[in-house]
Image (cartoon, rainbow, N blue to C red):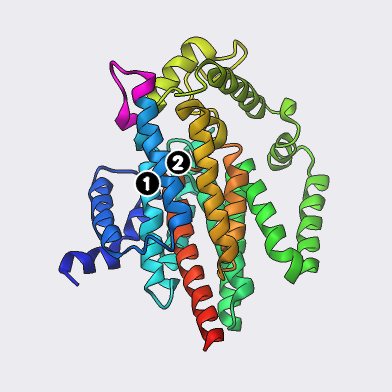
Amino acid sequence: MTGLDRAVSAGWILLPVAALYSISGAQAIATLLILHWFWSRLDPHALRPVLVPLAAFLIWTVAAALLAEPASPDVRGALEKWIFALTLPAAWAWARRQESIRGPITALLAAGMVILPWGLSVFLSTEGSRAGGFSGSGPHLGSNLMMAFVVASALAFAARRAWVAVGLALSSLLLLAGVGLSLNRSALLGAIVAAVLICARRRPLLLAAGLALVAAGVTAFPLSKPALRLRSALLFNVDDTARERALMWAGGCRMIRARPLAGFTSRSRFADAYSAEYRDAQSREPRPGHVHNSYLQAAVLHGIPGLGLLLWWLAGLVRLALRSREAAAVPLLVAVFVNAGFDFVLADGQHALMWFALVGLLLGSGVRAALGARAGRRV
């Protein structure tokens, strides 16, 4: 193994960890190192259910960019939101060759917990800064803390040592508190759905107690901001930001009808077209970066064929997760799919790097464990 191989093998996890704080040009160099190591270490046959649709999707984004604007195609803009997906096979390749994924998983969870006090301080010290502290242009803590909570909770139930289970359980409670403080409704909804999956079969009484506690809190403080935001997740007309999402979704549907094949290619061209022609007159946000729905946004950017290829790719992930022996794999996918219905989680900066790294680690390790178990039975 060369020095470069050793460096990338040991240090690739720093890319998604650093992305919790910001996306920088240096991470492009790190991505090149990861790609070098990924292609030299990957078992393409085992990851075929994901690699084939991922490759088809990336190829289509380029082709659609050429079809949409033949004179001046924005290929870079079309790929920039999805190129971090290559972190997934890199994480998979690493996990397939390791006895344990405890190190990188711990690094990701710890990074999410360490940055929580900073987000909380921004939230408390500056009026109207919830988005700056927990999402938007700042670190996307709502979705990232949701993912960390799901993984910590699932691993707590699967832990064989009591002290490990207790430590993970306490960490998961702290992470869930962070999700709650972010007031990110879709992340909280994803966390709740994942918790139902994790607890329903193993600890139904714990699930019932948690739901009862939430219900009691909403009943006792019906006019509190968390209670109002939780209600507005289902009743969009009681909250301005929820109503704005509905208007964005309608605008996104109009854009899909206008360009069903090739889409609008890139984020900048989407924003230009949306603000100039497709924005609803009642909408408050003049130039959003996306329509707050990963599936609609994929169709807006890359047409209906792009959405179909994205769904094929996600179905491949589900197929591998169902075969996996990692307890957190399926709940994590479900939580992110729910969250993705309200935000551009699948391809937006910090969201995406945490998502791809965790999924790659869990699926690579889980499939390796499943193959080992089958081999043991044959012996």
Q: Nearer the viewer, residue 304 or 82?
A: 304
Locate residue 112, reporting x and y percent.
47, 56
CA neighbours of label 2 inside 10 A, class few (<14), some (14 to 19), many (20+): many
Locate residue 237, reporting x and y percent.
74, 25
Residue identified by numbered label 2:
347
Locate residue 248, reporting x and y percent.
58, 23
Q: Which structural element holds mark 1? A: helix
Residue identified by numbered label 1:
84
Q: Residue at x 66, y 29 (%)?
A: 242
Q: Is residue 12 magenta?
A: no
Q: Is residue 75 magenta?
A: yes
Vertical relation: 165 (above or below) 358: below
Asked if labels 1 and 2 touch by Cβ distance under 8 angstroms, the answer is yes
Distance in Å between CA atoms under marks 2 and 1: 8 Å
Q: Nearer the viewer, residue 148 or 4?
A: 4
Locate residue 105, reporting x and y percent.
45, 66
